[in-house]
Image (tube, rainbow, N blue to C red):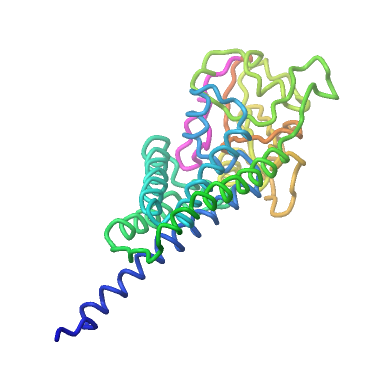
Amino acid sequence: MIESNTPASRQFIVIGWIGAILIRLVVPAWIIFGALQKATGGTPKSLPRSILDAGSTLGVTDHFLLLATLVSIEFVFVAFMLFSPKLAKPAGIVMLGTFLIVLCVEMFGYGNYESCGCFGEKSLSPMAMFAIDFTLLLGIIFIPQRKSACSSNCWNWSFVLVPTFALLATLFTFTTVMGNKPSNSTSTENPSLPPLPASWYPQNISNWLDKPVDEIPLFDWVKEWPIDIRQGKQYIIFYSLTCDHCEALLWEYFEFPAFPTTLVAIPQSTDGFNYDGAFDNPCQDCQKTELRIGVDWIIGTPLVVALENGIVKCATENEEYEAPACLIH
């Protein structure tokens, strides 16, 4: 008589359980955590720039709608992983594979190695997220999954549970994200200005070169210019109060600016400024102003703009203080 409960069979059973737990519990929990962070944060800042650009290419200009849609899609794939034994593995492979593609585009296409937005505004680096997602993907591909002992009745239940979970998660996501969208219209301080957007980011910043500031909407949304920015050589620096790169750039090159310099503070949220953790500004001779409150500003800081008689001569987002590209000579 052959003993079925051999060490090899027990090992296969253990591996099968590991595979099942990975695809039915660990991976969906990982995706749910990131999706919840992005949904409750409710800001398009959590979307990678590549996704924002792709949305614009497809004609999606509402970044809050784009965020809600993409997070809802993540929840739909989670629904299959949780409640559909037959489709759990394909759903996990598609979702993790998509994450890896986006991360590759961010790192190698956009040079973004700082934050991927995978867990909202505060996230791990794209490299760290790539390592985790790639490890999980290899796990669900190569670790055998224990076959479900469910009968055909289980499969029938998945037809109920998958759409129910997906619908509830989608309703939660759209309600939460779209509830954070500001309802901006015209500026109350100056009705002649163009309407404020709900969110904005500098798309195709290279197109600013040799254009007058009057043709760039961002300059119209500054609260009040303390000096005439259309005269002579000047710097305009859009910065965040808590930006380490901004602080380093100012200390290195703008403690005693060689040309007139205006610092434009960017509100951290649609509600305004958070002064906790704000750095001490070394540029005492810089003029200071701020962007208007009520917009979700998606700007890589510091955004340095070099002007000459109101014409943009250089503009760089996420300016590096070690080798700045927009210094006037």
Residue in front for this viewpoint, 175 or 288: 175
Image point (66%, 30%), residue name: 261
Q: Position of residue 161 (x, y in %)?
A: 54, 53
Q: Inspect the magenta stretch and tell me whether residue 232 lies in it.
A: no
On screen, residue 24 versus residue 269, left or right, reads left
Query: Is residue 146 depicted above or below 159 in this figure?
Result: below
Image point (46%, 63%), residue name: 25
Q: Position of residue 179 (x, y in %)?
A: 73, 40
Tell me if I can see residue 82 in this picture.
yes
Dividing the picture into quadrants, the one containing residue 8 is bottom left
**Dominant secondary-structure state across the stretch colored magenta:** loop
Query: Is residue 52 depicted above or below 133 in this figure?
Result: above
Dividing the picture into quadrants, the one containing residue 281 is top right
Query: Is residue 124 depicted above or below 170 in this figure?
Result: below
Residue in front for this viewpoint, 124 or 142: 142
Tell me if I can see residue 226 in this picture.
no
Q: Position of residue 49 (x, y in %)?
A: 50, 35
On screen, residue 318 versus residue 101, left or right, reads right
Image point (14%, 86%), residue name: 1
Residue in front for this viewpoint, 29 or 324: 29
Residue found at the very far right of the displayed protein = 189
Q: Position of residue 282 (x, y in %)?
A: 67, 45
Image point (69%, 54%), residue name: 277
Residue in front for this viewpoint, 312 or 216: 216
Magenta range is 311-329
Q: How many marks?
A: 0
On screen, residue 264 versus residue 131, left or right, reads right
